[in-house]
């Protein structure tokens, strides 16, 4: 028996026969051809590319719901294959160096993957996996080898693979796959997002899984703990069968809470909302009991394309989500691109410290025409639902006023052209820079709401790079400075009569639900699947007791002390929960 630890990507427990799906990039050896053979190598590469496109198109045609995430991701893969850069660079590399086609393509592919690897933003960095997946397909087609197919699976199995492509996950829909585990990936990879939308247990980022797999007959995937067991003993199988039963019961229990309002025992109402990245995630959010969308990231519209998205593309996308949540708020964050946030068409210069560089609202104020295109689309879509808009990375009042001035220009233009829009659409800001938290009393007078972005606020307030393994241990949501900043922002918002939301990862962590209630947050926005559990905790809580507890907690001097006291309190109050 071998036990491996990875990243829990999709909750649930799968137990079944292992099925190895070879998705590692095949090795290429540097090799050259004679000058007379160069044209043949170019032709072979072009045939492999065409064959890969045909395969993706065929799989995409099998996805009947054209608005689904699968269909969209497969379209992204097709767009990558049709990217002239990939084609032209490979052909040029073959011709200039007389390289064999597979080596030339691999060389170009590795260069592009390295570009993605340098991106700091984890969501955008994960898009490099899309490129790796299509690279695998092209290389296999170049070698003339048939690809293992998920569609060929006829019996219930647990898939073990280096990675899974959207083409694979699209086929999982129609196959008896119990769960899967992969070497690579993160919680924000397409594979993980798809697993959660399909509610299939999954663990990713296991690193050496395919090396360790060997010929294991039985595989257990614990998508909640992030554990994979190869060749388990009979006793371990029995143990996980019981865990599976318990998990299923918990899901049935939590489903009851999804339909209930989020009201504490003493009558304080909170809004639990969903963070989404794709319009297709709206259905999962609704099923999970989301009151609306607290954070709609719009950067995906800019990914993997050479041109800029049109106003109509923006508009159609926003309208679709607004109509899904017709009676509830949809909070659209204007795009957070620039700096480390990759968008090939923007041709941005490298920066020494991109996380704190030309990005988000700073980039929008520099490239106003791109910003105005999105603003027009958001305002037009505002008549189709209850849309709110918020600006990311606001550092102070002057910057906010500059952004609002651009909005007013766009509003005036729409009024002049008699284009309808919601003239009362609420506009707020993300509070994610310490300076904004410090002057939140001044900012609160100028906006309709605050949303605290804890991921960046913690990073900037504690001056740590959260993807740097040497200092990542300092990323402490319970640091006294962070809790005091949150309290300050909530107080400033309430003094000005505006609601204060939280949309960072901290909002969806059940351990923090009680302290966030005590700090006075009005809305919490999180991954949709976390909503029922957080809702259950809040419905069992008493708001005024949580407020008293928060006050006591803030007297402690270190994150360690606060964490210890908080966990003890949560275990006392909610003995049926696991923290």
Image (tube, grey):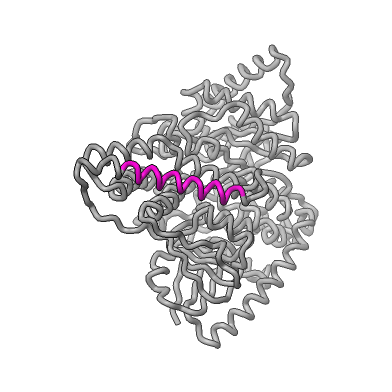
Q: Residue at x 63, y 59 (%)?
A: 173
Q: Is residue 271 left or right of residue 390?
A: right
Q: Is residue 57 magenta?
A: yes
As displayed, is residue 284 above or below residue 228?
above
Q: Percent from the top left, x then y, of residue 321? A: 69, 40
Q: Percent from the top left, x then y, of residue 261? A: 79, 53
Image quarter hosting the C terminus? bottom right
Give the camera-side residue of 436 and 394: 394
Work out whether residue 457 can be spotted.
no
Q: Is residue 153 magenta?
A: no
Q: The magenta stretch spans which residues?
A: 42-61
Image quarter hosting the N terminus? bottom left
Q: Quadrant of residue 40?
A: top left
Count of number-bearing discs: 0
Examine the residues drawn in magenta and state their main secondary structure: helix
Work out whether residue 455 can be spotted.
yes
As displayed, is residue 320 above or below residue 549?
above
Q: Residue at x 52, y 79 (%)?
A: 218
């Amino acid at each position: 028996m071998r036990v491996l630890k990875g990243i829990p990507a999709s909750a649930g427990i799968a137990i079944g026969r292992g099925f190895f799906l070879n998705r590692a990039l095949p090795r290429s050896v540097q090799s050259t051809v004679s000058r007379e053979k160069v044209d043949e190598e170019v032709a072979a590469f072009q045939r492999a590319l065409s064959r890969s496109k045909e395969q993706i198109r065929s799989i995409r045609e099998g996805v009947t719901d054209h608005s689904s995430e699968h269909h969209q991701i497969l379209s992204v893969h097709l767009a990558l294959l049709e990217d002239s850069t990939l084609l032209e660079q490979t052909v040029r590399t073959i011709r200039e160096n007389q390289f064999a086609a597979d080596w030339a393509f691999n060389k170009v592919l590795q260069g592009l993957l390295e570009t993605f690897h340098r991106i700091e933003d984890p969501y955008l960095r994960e898009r490099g996996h899309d490129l790796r997946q299509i690279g695998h397909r092209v290389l296999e087609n170049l070698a003339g080898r048939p690809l293992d197919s998920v569609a060929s699976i006829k019996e219930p199995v647990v898939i073990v693979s280096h990675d899974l492509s959207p083409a694979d996950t699209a086929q999982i829909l129609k196959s008896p796959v119990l769960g899967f585990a992969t070497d690579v990936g993160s919680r924000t990879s397409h594979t993980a997002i798809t697993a959660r939308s399909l509610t299939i247990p999954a663990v990713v980022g296991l690193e050496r899984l395919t090396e360790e797999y060997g010929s294991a007959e039985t595989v257990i995937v614990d998508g909640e703990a992030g554990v994979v067991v190869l060749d388990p003993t009979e006793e371990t199988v029995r143990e996980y069968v019981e865990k599976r039963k318990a998990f299923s019961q918990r899901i049935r229990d939590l489903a009851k809470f999804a339909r209930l309002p989020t009201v504490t025992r003493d009558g304080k109402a909170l809004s639990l909302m969903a963070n989404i990245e794709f319009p297709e995630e709206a259905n999962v959010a609704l099923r999970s009991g989301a009151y609306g969308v607290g954070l709609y990231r719009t950067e995906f519209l800019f990914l993997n394309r050479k041109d800029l998205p049109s106003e109509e593309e923006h508009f159609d996308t926003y309208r679709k989500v607004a109509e899904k949540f017709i009676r509830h708020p949809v909070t659209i964050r204007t795009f957070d691109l620039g700096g480390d946030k990759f968008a090939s068409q923007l041709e941005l210069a490298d920066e020494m410290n991109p996380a704190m560089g030309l990005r988000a609202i700073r980039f929008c104020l520099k490239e106003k025409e791109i910003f105005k295109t999105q603003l027009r689309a958001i305002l037009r879509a505002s008549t189709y639902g209850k849309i709110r808009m918020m600006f990311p990375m606001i550092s102070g009042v002057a910057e906010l006023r500059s952004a609002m001035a651009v909005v007013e220009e766009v509003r005036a233009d729409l009024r002049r052209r008699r284009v309808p829009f919601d003239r009362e659409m609420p506009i707020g800001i993300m509070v994610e820079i310490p300076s904004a938290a410090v002057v939140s009393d001044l900012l609160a007078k100028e906006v309709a709401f605050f949303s605290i972005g804890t991921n960046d606020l913690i990073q900037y307030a504690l001056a740590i790079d959260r993807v740097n393994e040497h200092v990542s241990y300092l990323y402490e949501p319970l640091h006294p400075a962070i809790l005091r900043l949150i309290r300050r922002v909530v107080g400033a918002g309430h003094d000005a009569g505006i609601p204060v939301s939280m949309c960072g990862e901290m909002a969806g962590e059940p351990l923090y639900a009680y302290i966030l209630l005590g700090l006075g947050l009005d809305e919490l926005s999180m991954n949709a699947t976390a909503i029922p559990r957080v809702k259950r905790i809040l419905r069992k809580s008493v708001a005024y007791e949580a407020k008293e507890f928060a006050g006591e907690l803030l007297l402690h001097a270190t994150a360690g002390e606060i964490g210890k006291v908080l966990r003890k309190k949560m275990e006392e109050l909610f003995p049926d929960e696991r923290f």
